[in-house]
């Protein structure tokens, strides 16, 4: 895959370690869920290094008063793409407990792989916030592209997208369709198979998170 200015691929030993366990077919649903949250927290720390609204406050230490920088309340909205994106919400909330949550429901048609939007509920005022879309899997990129476009159509101007595993073709598609959106992917896999699954991947993230298979 070529390099894109708006794509960051994490190459961190701690994240790589957790992803190795996440992929393993023997990993239980409970452990899978916990790992998705932990990886998301590690990714959030890095992804939100830039662009987070901060404000200054006065803090009185036992010795003197000083001016300190804190994250502005209610400045971030997390938008999981249902279902699998739900598994990442707590991982962001650990670091940004006041973040509101909008939901976009999308389901990939198994034959055409084209996503269909079946639900959308977003917090009021989202257009002025930093919007962090989360979905563990970026395969063809169709779901990510449609979710980003939906949010842009609602007026959102500051959007980041975070996925745990990406396929090169999907990452390129999103990067080229939305050059103004920062894309963070923990690891880049080899390719998609004929059914649109990422190889080596981890299987169906929604099924593994919620035990539906
Ligand atoms: C999965 C995944 C992404 C999408 C990625 O969801 O969570 O949303 O596929 O594929 P794409 O990049 O080719 O669009 P799925 O449609 O299987 O729904 P689910 O989360 O409800 O299982
Ligand atoms: N969605 C998943 O859950 N897994 C894949 O490999 C591709 C799309």
Image (tube, rainbow, N blue to C red):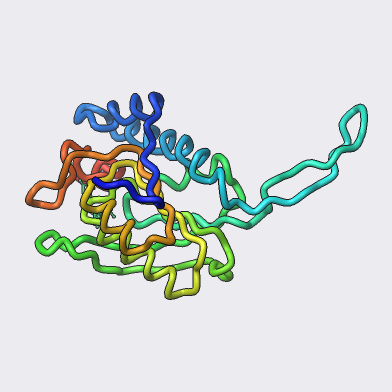
Q: Position of residue 40 (x, y in %)?
A: 43, 40
Question: Splitting the image into 4 quarters, where does residue 103 fall?
Answer: bottom left
Q: Position of residue 183 (x, y in %)?
A: 39, 51
**Relative to 109, residue 57 above or below:** above
| Residue at x 21%, y 55% (from the top left corner) | 140
Q: Position of residue 173 (x, y in %)?
A: 26, 58
Q: Position of residue 76 (x, y in %)?
A: 57, 55
Which quarter of the rendering shows the N terminus? top left
Residue placed most toward the observer, 182 or 45: 182
* Horizontal relation, residue 49 to residue 143: left or right: right
Residue placed most toward the observer, 32 or 159: 159
| Residue at x 35%, y 68% (from the top left corner) | 119
Question: Splitting the image into 4 quarters, where does residue 109 fall?
Answer: bottom left
In this rendering, the count of numbered labels is 0
**Relative to 26, residue 60 above or below:** below
* Horizontal relation, residue 195 to residue 45: left or right: left
Residue 85 visible (yes or no): no
| Residue at x 86%, y 38% (from the top left corner) | 66
* Horizontal relation, residue 91 to residue 143: left or right: right
Question: Splitting the image into 4 quarters, where does residue 34 fall?
Answer: top left
Residue 156 visible (yes or no): yes
Q: Please tell me in which quarter of the rendered image ligand 1 is found.
A: bottom left
Judged from this view, the residue extending furthest toward the left is 194
**Relative to 160, residue 21 above or below:** above
Residue placed most toward the observer, 188 or 163: 188
């Amino acid at each position: 895959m070529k390099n894109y200015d708006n794509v960051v691929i994490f190459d961190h030993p701690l994240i790589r370690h957790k992803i190795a366990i996440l992929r393993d077919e023997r990993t239980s649903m409970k452990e899978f869920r916990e790992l998705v949250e932990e990886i998301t927290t590690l990714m959030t720390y890095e992804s939100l290094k830039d662009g987070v609204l901060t404000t200054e406050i006065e803090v009185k230490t036992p010795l003197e008063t000083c001016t300190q920088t804190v994250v502005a309340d209610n400045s971030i909205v997390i938008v999981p793409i249902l279902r699998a994106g739900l598994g990442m919400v707590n991982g962001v909330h650990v670091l940004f407990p006041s973040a509101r949550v909008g939901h976009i429901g999308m389901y990939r048609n198994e034959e055409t792989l084209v996503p269909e939007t079946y639900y959308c509920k977003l917090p009021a005022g989202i257009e002025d916030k930093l919007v962090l879309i989360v979905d563990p899997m970026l395969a063809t990129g169709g779901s990510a592209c449609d979710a980003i476009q939906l949010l842009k159509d609602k007026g959102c101007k500051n959007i980041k997208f975070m996925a745990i595993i990406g396929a090169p073709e999907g990452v390129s598609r999103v990067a080229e369709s939305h050059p103004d959106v920062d894309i963070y992917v923990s690891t880049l896999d080899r390719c998609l198979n004929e059914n649109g699954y990422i190889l080596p991947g981890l299987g169906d993230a929604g099924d593994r998170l919620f035990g539906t298979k």
